[in-house]
Image (cartoon, grey):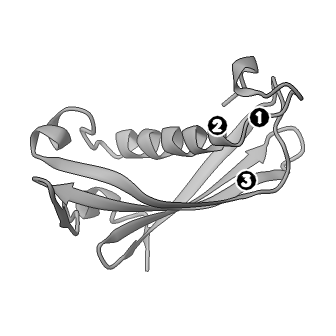
């Protein structure tokens, strides 16, 4: 991805809140790449993944125009799906931000294990 100017503060660095957007976009693209019909069928089935907790550690600032790589690994821990995510500046491979995002899954308004996602993610789940 590339940093857009409007994502930067007056000092020209990416506003911290935008890293949450980058991480969210990465998770959505990951789900889409697995063939999960995220926006249509999943919600129609009453399955709603929600962020329960986000823990971010900022390391090096991105600035306007920087290209970066956003990566993730995923694990299952009880009822939570946990994404470990990192953002690296492409020009020098500097770690800019790393985070742990815990996702809970609601099914018909009640907390569930979200087993629906396990079959799609089986090749990527860490134990």
**Frontmost residue, 92 versus 63:** 63
Q: In the rendering, at what x and y percent does residue 114 appear?
A: 22, 63
Q: CA distance from mark 2 to mark 3?
A: 11 Å
Q: In the rendering, at what x and y percent does residue 121 appear?
A: 34, 60
Crowd class of label 1 (few under 14; some 14 to 19; many from 20; radius 10 Å): many
Toward which corner of the image does residue 29 lie, by quadrant? top left
**Residue at 27 percent of width and 44 percent of height:** 36
**Frontmost residue, 50 versus 125:** 50
Crowd class of label 2 (few under 14; some 14 to 19; many from 20; radius 10 Å): few
**Residue at 19 percent of width and 66 percent of height:** 112
Label 3 element class: strand
Looking at the figure, which quarter contains the N terminus? top right
Q: Nearer the viewer, mark 2 or mark 3?
A: 2
Instruction: Check whether the beta carbons of the residues at disc 2 and disc 3 lie within 8 A of each other.
Output: no
Q: In the rendering, at what x and y percent does residue 72 appear?
A: 56, 56
**Residue at 84 percent of width and 49 percent of height:** 93
Q: Which mark is residue 5?
A: none
Q: Is residue 64 rendered to the left or right of residue 20?
A: right
Residue identifier under label 2:
18
Furthest residue toward top = 5
Q: In the rendering, at what x and y percent does residue 5 appear?
A: 76, 19
Q: CA distance from mark 2 to mark 1?
A: 7 Å
Toward which corner of the image does residue 18 lie, by quadrant? top right
Measured along the vertical axis of the image, is residue 5 above or below residue 33? above
Q: CA distance from mark 3 to mark 1?
A: 11 Å
**Frontmost residue, 96 versus 15:** 15
Instruction: Check whether the beta carbons of the residues at disc 2 and disc 1 lie within 8 A of each other.
Output: yes
Residue identifier under label 3:
97
Toward which corner of the image does residue 124 lie, by quadrant? bottom left
Residue identifier under label 1:
14
Label 2 element class: helix
């Amino acid at each position: 991805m590339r940093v857009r100017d409007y994502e930067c503060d007056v000092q020209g660095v990416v506003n911290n809140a935008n890293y949450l957007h980058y991480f969210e976009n990465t998770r959505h693209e990951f789900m889409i790449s697995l063939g999960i019909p995220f926006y249509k069928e999943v919600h129609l089935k009453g399955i709603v993944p929600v962020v329960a907790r986000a823990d971010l550690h900022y390391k090096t600032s991105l600035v306007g125009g920087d290209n970066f790589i956003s990566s993730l690994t995923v694990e299952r821990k009880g009822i939570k799906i946990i994404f470990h995510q990192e953002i690296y500046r492409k020009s020098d491979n500097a770690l800019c931000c790393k985070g742990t995002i815990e996702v809970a899954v609601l099914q018909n308004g009640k907390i569930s294990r979200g087993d629906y996602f396990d079959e799609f993610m089986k090749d990527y789940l860490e134990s």
